[in-house]
Image (tube, coloured by chain):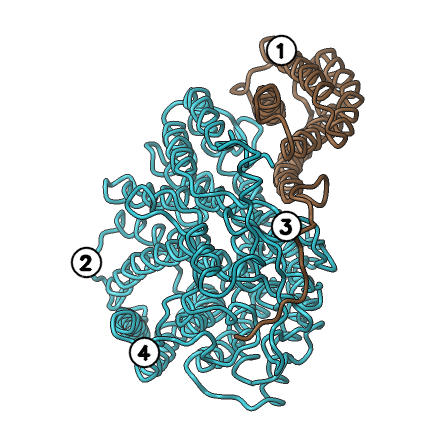
Chain colours: A brown, B cyan
């Protein structure tokens, strides 16, 4: 078909941040999927609690590991916010330090979660409450591990010859996903440690 | 090559013209030759074609099972298939048709066509696209290998607990079903993400929201349904596997769980699933009607809003599958109302299509013939749908052949007929040849007659009280005649597909070469050669109207893109204003390796929970291989 040249795009940049970038939208779509999984799981938790005479049937789990986790994750929002703006400014040195810090925070969070798994008052095979409790905590743990794994690889990448250009956009998308990991824990925290009936 | 050398040689398409431009772009975007190249391909057209062919293989397998079912039921007390095998066969038929054919084939067409229709060079996240195909293939192979090895599922396509739970189905049959779901849903979710991002961010400059082709709109809404509904069934199937493997009690009432929870989780996915299959088909109908009426679609805005309305409403209907579980009356009334409500946007669509045909000059070629068949069959399915939305009627016909008739009218009429029309419509683009019109008409009439003869009698059988999923019946019930008729119809319907396959095979070998735009259609996929070159377009088009190819003047295009590596245009969400020239990933073997690792993990985890741990590590390693940049120029 006949064509005519109407617009030259030579001057356009080759990568962008936030809603300009494809990966940002991809990340958002995965957040929507995983957010739906959390919603369905919490829905199942309340569904089973509505059928039970007493929920939980035994004592609530101690809130301290969850509370410390909540505090740590909320505090991590600050460096996470910083790393996003440092990535946009393409400040390699500061981004490297920021990634090291975020990796450390993530590893501590995983350690807290495993400590909690070993000390939970109920096992998953005891009753449906135990199953749901482990399911919710496990689901969130999976997200922690995935994000921390991603952060560690990205940290290595930024210390390599690839630490330039488009990779800063990847750093900001990784920070974006961490907001979800933090944001998902807030409702889960209240559901797991403070909701009871009967 | 260092980065500075690379930048020095960074040639743009304004520096090259004509044949030289075409061949340079083709070599940059083409898939390497040989087996390794084929396994590494990330071209959306190649992956889309594989998806389509694989889905049709599963259609044939599922169809063969349907023929077996109909042979067994063609007379009273037939002894062709025993009860155990029969349970497996109808389970495999439903699971194959829903999870391995209907959803994947629609997504396959999206994978092939959406990038072409929005005027870009590859789908967003092309490696994820390749990965999703391998996962889909592995899931389908897993189910069918298990079936052949006599570990096939036998608990129905929705695998209700407690039947599918550890107490009533020991062994691995239920696990095979549940893990097939995980495979296919992972693949479907990946494609949904790609389609959303492609439609949002890779549209040709100037393709504002109100210029997006209706087919793309339908695929976009479908992708959102996938995004929000499939997590429910993945969660449910994971919980089922855990109940069976590590002794959790999600669905076990003796441990504080609940069997009806399964039904809720399944149908929260399962009802949108119907629209995941149906909405893409409406997109095909819109494309065909516009082209064969020769005029722009009547009521474009109403159609887009209807698609979105159907998408939202489809999440509020799931309980009408559960009317007989003893719901509170208010709940039942609410879901009756919402089930009837969804008929309104669906009706709006039908009136817009009729309006377009009325105002245009329809050409009655094969694609339009299938669309007219769709109208007839789907409207009947829709009307029986309004009937079973009412609780008293549903209570009477629940689990009878009336329901079987209803959902085959909806799914085959609503999705398969438009799909077949779509194949006749797009085959020239995909295969580069015209399909034989005479055989197409034979195909249509045998399919139309065969389908109605096969499925209409089932309404009556259902009203006579014939339950679904029974492997035989006694002669004194008086169901023989209608069942025999139905079986004859099924054979004719099956034969229609043989005509279709013959037509495709013959035309592919010896058909007349297809020109770029054989139907005089208006959308961008027809602006390029048939079949399209690896780069799709030599220059990305600019869209200045809803029907960009219906014009006298030359099509405006952009320049300034790279010709030595893969680059495409990223545009803004609503206005489609150019924002970036972004690199598109090259071919890679890593998606296949990652898919193998995921397959090992999924299959392993129905035998031991530790597979999640070591399999997770395996998957992580392959992901690093996938994402680690192979050259500094990729970071640019």
**Viewer-proximal residue among B22 and A71:** B22
**Earlier along the polypeptide chain: callout 4 or callout 2?**
2
- Mark 4 and mark 1 residues within 8 Å of each other at the beta carbon: no
Same subunit, tags 2 and 1: no
Q: Would you say residue B2 is visible in this rendering?
A: yes
Question: Is A32 placed left or right of B119 in the picture?
Answer: right
> Is the residue marked by circle 2 packed among few (<14), some (14-19), or many (20+) residues within 10 Å?
few
For label 1, count other residues whose C-alpha is less than 10 Å away and answer few (under 14), some (14-19) or many (20+): few
Q: Earlier in the sequence, mark 2 or mark 3?
A: 2
Q: Nearer the viewer, mark 4 or mark 2?
A: 4
Query: Mark 4 and mark 2: span between their CA atoms?
Result: 48 Å
Q: Secondary structure at mark 3?
A: loop
Kindly identify which chain the residue marked by label 3 belongs to: B
Position of residue B433 measured from the top left corner of the image (x, y, whole percent): 35, 73
- The answer to whether residue B99 is above or below residue B472 is above
Q: Which of the two discs, 4 and 1, sits closer to the camera?
A: 4
Callout 3 crowding tier (Cα within 10 Å): few <14, some 14–19, many ≥20: few
Query: For mark 4, what is the residue?
Result: B512
Q: Is residue B610 above or below residue B116?
A: above
Q: Report in which chain the residue with disc 1 lies.
A: A
- Answer with the quarter of the image where residue B484 lies: bottom left
Q: CA distance from mark 3 to mark 4?
A: 59 Å
Q: Chain of mark 4?
A: B
* B586 relative position to B557: left or right: left
Image vertical order of residue B44 relative to residue A172, above or below: below
For disc 3, the marked residue is B327
Q: Which residue is mark 1?
A: A111
């Amino acid at each position: 078909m006949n064509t005519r040249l109407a617009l030259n795009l030579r001057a356009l940049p080759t990568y962008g941040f936030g809603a300009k970038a494809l990966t940002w939208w991809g990340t958002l779509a995965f957040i929507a999927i995983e957010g739906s999984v959390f919603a369905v799981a919490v829905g199942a938790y309340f569904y089973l609690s509505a059928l039970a005479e007493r929920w939980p049937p035994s004592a609530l789990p101690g809130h301290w590991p969850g509370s410390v986790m909540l505090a740590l994750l909320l505090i991590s929002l600050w460096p996470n916010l910083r790393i996003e703006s440092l990535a946009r400014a393409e400040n390699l040195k500061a981004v490297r330090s920021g990634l090291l810090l975020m990796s450390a925070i993530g590893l501590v969070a995983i350690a807290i979660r495993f400590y909690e798994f070993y000390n939970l008052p109920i096992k998953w095979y005891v009753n449906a409450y135990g199953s749901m409790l482990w399911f919710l905590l496990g689901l969130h743990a999976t997200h922690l591990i995935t994000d921390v794994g991603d952060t560690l690889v990205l940290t290595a990448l930024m210390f390599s010859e690839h630490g330039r250009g488009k990779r800063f956009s990847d750093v900001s998308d990784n920070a974006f996903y961490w907001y979800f990991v933090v944001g998902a824990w807030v409702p889960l925290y209240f559901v797991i440690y403070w909701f009871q009936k009967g | 090559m260092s980065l500075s050398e690379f930048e020095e040689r960074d040639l743009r398409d304004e520096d090259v013209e004509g044949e030289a431009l075409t061949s340079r772009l083709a070599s940059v975007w083409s898939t390497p030759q040989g087996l390794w190249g084929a396994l590494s391909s990330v071209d959306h057209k190649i992956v889309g074609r594989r998806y389509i062919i694989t889905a049709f293989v599963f259609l044939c397998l599922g169809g063969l099972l349907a023929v077996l079912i109909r042979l067994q039921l063609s007379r009273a007390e037939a002894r062709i298939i025993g009860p155990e095998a029969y349970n497996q066969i109808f389970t495999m038929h439903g699971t194959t048709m829903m999870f391995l054919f209907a959803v994947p084939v629609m997504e396959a067409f999206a994978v092939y066509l959406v990038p072409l229709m929005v005027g870009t060079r590859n789908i967003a996240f092309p490696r994820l696209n390749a990965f999703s195909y391998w996962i889909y293939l592995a899931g389908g192979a897993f189910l069918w290998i298990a079936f052949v090895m006599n570990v096939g599922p036998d608990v129905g396509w929705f695998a209700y607990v407690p039947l599918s739970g550890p107490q009533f189905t020991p062994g691995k049959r239920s696990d095979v079903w549940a893990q097939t779901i995980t495979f296919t849903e992972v693949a479907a979710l990946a494609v949904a993400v790609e389609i959303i991002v492609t439609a949002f961010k890779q549209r040709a400059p100037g393709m504002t929201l109100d210029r997006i082709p209706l087919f793309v709109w339908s695929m976009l809404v479908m992708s959102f349904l996938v995004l929000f509904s499939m997590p429910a069934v993945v969660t449910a199937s994971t919980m089922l596997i855990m109940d069976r493997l590590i002794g959790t009690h999600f669905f076990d009432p003796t441990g504080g769980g609940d069997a009806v929870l399964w039904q809720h989780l399944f149908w929260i996915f399962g009802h949108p699933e119907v629209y995941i299959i149906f909405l893409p088909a409406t997109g095909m109908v819109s494309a065909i009607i516009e082209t064969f009426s020769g005029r722009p679609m009547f009521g474009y805005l109403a159609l887009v809003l209807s698609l979105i309305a159907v998408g939202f409403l489809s999440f509020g209907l799931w309980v009408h599958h559960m009317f007989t579980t003893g719901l509170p009356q208010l709940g039942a009334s609410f879901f009756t109302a919402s089930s009837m409500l969804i008929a309104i946007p669906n009706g709006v669509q039908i009136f817009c299509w009729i309006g377009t045909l009325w105002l245009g000059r329809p050409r009655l070629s094969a694609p339009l013939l299938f669309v007219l068949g769709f109208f007839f069959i789907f409207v009947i399915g829709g009307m029986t749908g309004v009937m079973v939305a009412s609780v008293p009627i549903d209570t009477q016909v629940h689990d009878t052949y009336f329901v079987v008739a209803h959902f085959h009218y909806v799914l085959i009429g609503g999705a398969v007929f438009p799909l077949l029309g779509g194949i006749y419509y797009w085959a020239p683009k995909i295969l580069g040849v015209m399909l034989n019109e005479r055989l197409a008409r034979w195909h249509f009439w045998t399919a139309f007659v065969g389908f109605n003869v096969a499925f209409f009698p089932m309404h009556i059988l259902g009203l006579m009280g014939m339950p679904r999923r029974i492997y035989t019946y006694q002669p004194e019930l008086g169901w023989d005649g209608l069942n025999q008729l139905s079986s004859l119809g099924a054979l004719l319907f099956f034969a229609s597909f043989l005509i279709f396959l013959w037509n495709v095979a013959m035309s592919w070998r010896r058909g007349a070469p297809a020109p770029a735009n054989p139907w005089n259609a208006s959308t961008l996929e027809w602006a390029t050669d048939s079949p399209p070159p690896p780069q799709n377009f030599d220059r990305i088009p600019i869209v200045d109207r809803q029907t960009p190819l219906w014009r006298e003047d030359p099509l405006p295009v952009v320049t300034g893109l790279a010709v030595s590596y893969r680059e495409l245009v990223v545009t803004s969400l609503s206005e489609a204003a150019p924002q970036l020239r972004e690199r598109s990933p090259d071919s890679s073997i890593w998606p296949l390796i990652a898919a193998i690792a995921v397959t090992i993990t999924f299959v392993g985890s129905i035998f031991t929970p530790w597979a999640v741990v070591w399999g997770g590590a395996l998957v992580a390693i392959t992901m690093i291989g996938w994402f680690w940049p192979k050259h500094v120029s990729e970071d640019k």
